[in-house]
Image: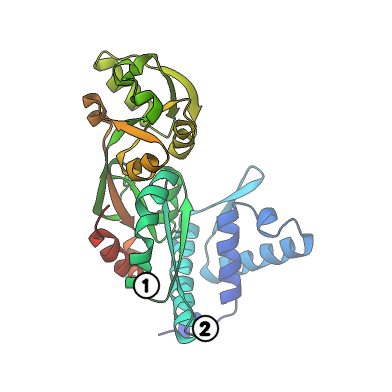
Amino acid sequence: MSEPLLARRGLSLDRLETFCRVAESGSIVKAANQDPVRQSLYSRQIRELEEFFGTALIERDGRGIKLTTAGKRLAQLAREQFAALRDFQQEVARQPVTLSIGSGNSVLEWVVTPQLPQLCQRLGNVEISLLNLRTRQIVRDLQDLRLDVGIIRKDAVTKGLKTVSFTKLTYAFFIPASWARKGVQQQLQSLPLALAAGESFQPQFLTAAANAGFTFRVVVQCSSFSQAAELAVSGKFIAVLPVVANDRLRKLGCVSVQIPFLEKCARELVLAWHPRLSAMRPIIPTAIDTLSALPGR
């Protein structure tokens, strides 16, 4: 079956690896680390692939490149095969099989990390990479077969990805315990609020609060829930955080306060993966089954 592929020159693992590297970098110059000799080599290898397949794989895009439709397809196929070959190499060498999990920092810290001992125990000889990524990047990396498993909002899932329910994130106000003892739960609107901006959380929170008749004094705009949590722990701010942070923050001197309108901010999280990559990498469906069955999420 491989005779037609091997009958002509121009196709090799080295050329495909170069092509994937350039595709990921978006530039031959970046992929070659600005080395002129390597740039020339990479350009020649891509031309040879284009001649072999008889179609353009890249096109100029300003100072960089972008993949053609055929180029996107070839990059996906090459990544699948490289992933399977890497797994096989690690398996026969009895090395840990790699698994990448991408999500926001707060989900990784408060939901995934506490479950890692059980996950590693059930997966066996595995090396897990936890990647703090924004939702759009997770979806893009899943589609491009550069990420094994993503934990994202259900409403962010795009066509072509498979999903299974993971957990529901609900939110609460977290207040320094010294303030809570003074009964300031009823004065939340007057307290300095550290609020995570996120990709959609802040406007969702502010809209839900306004609809419920609340106006809060946002003093610090944070780029993550973890930053807001640190400010709450400092004893100088209140913060709106996922309820899953409660056990950890209670030990650090914070108490949580539930306000009914925060239910409007709740988010369904799913485990997402690309079926083409999971078909090549048995570790992915095993990880999905294990993560979805873990208690205490």
Question: What element does badge 2 sit on?
Answer: helix
Q: Which residue is painted at 35% across and 42% down in the image? A: 245
Q: Is residue 42 left or right of residue 189?
A: right
- Asked if residue 160 can be seen in this view, the reply is no
Measured as percent of width and height from the top left, residue 29 is found at 70, 54
Depth check: 206 or 85 in front? Answer: 206
Relative to 204, residue 134 above or below: below
Q: Is residue 69 left or right of residue 149?
A: right
Query: Which of the 4 quarters of the picture holds residue 237?
Result: top left
The single residue placed furthest to the right in the displayed view is 36
Measured as percent of width and height from the top left, residue 69 is found at 46, 55
Cα distance in 3D space between marks 1 and 2: 23 Å
- Which residue is denoted by mark 2 in the rendering? 6
| Amino acid type, residue under disc 2 in the picture | Leu
Depth check: 153 or 65 in front? Answer: 153
Measured as percent of width and height from the top left, residue 216 is found at 37, 16
What is the number of the mark on residue 189? none
What is the number of the mark on residue 280? 1
Q: Nearer the viewer, mark 1 or mark 2?
A: 1
Depth check: 268 or 156 in front? Answer: 268
Please report whichever mark, 1 or 2, sits nearer to the chain's N-terminal start: 2
Q: Which residue is painted at 31% across and 33% down in the image? A: 256
Quadrant where the N terminus sits is bottom left
Q: Residues within 10 Å of mark 2 (few under 14, many from 20)?
A: few
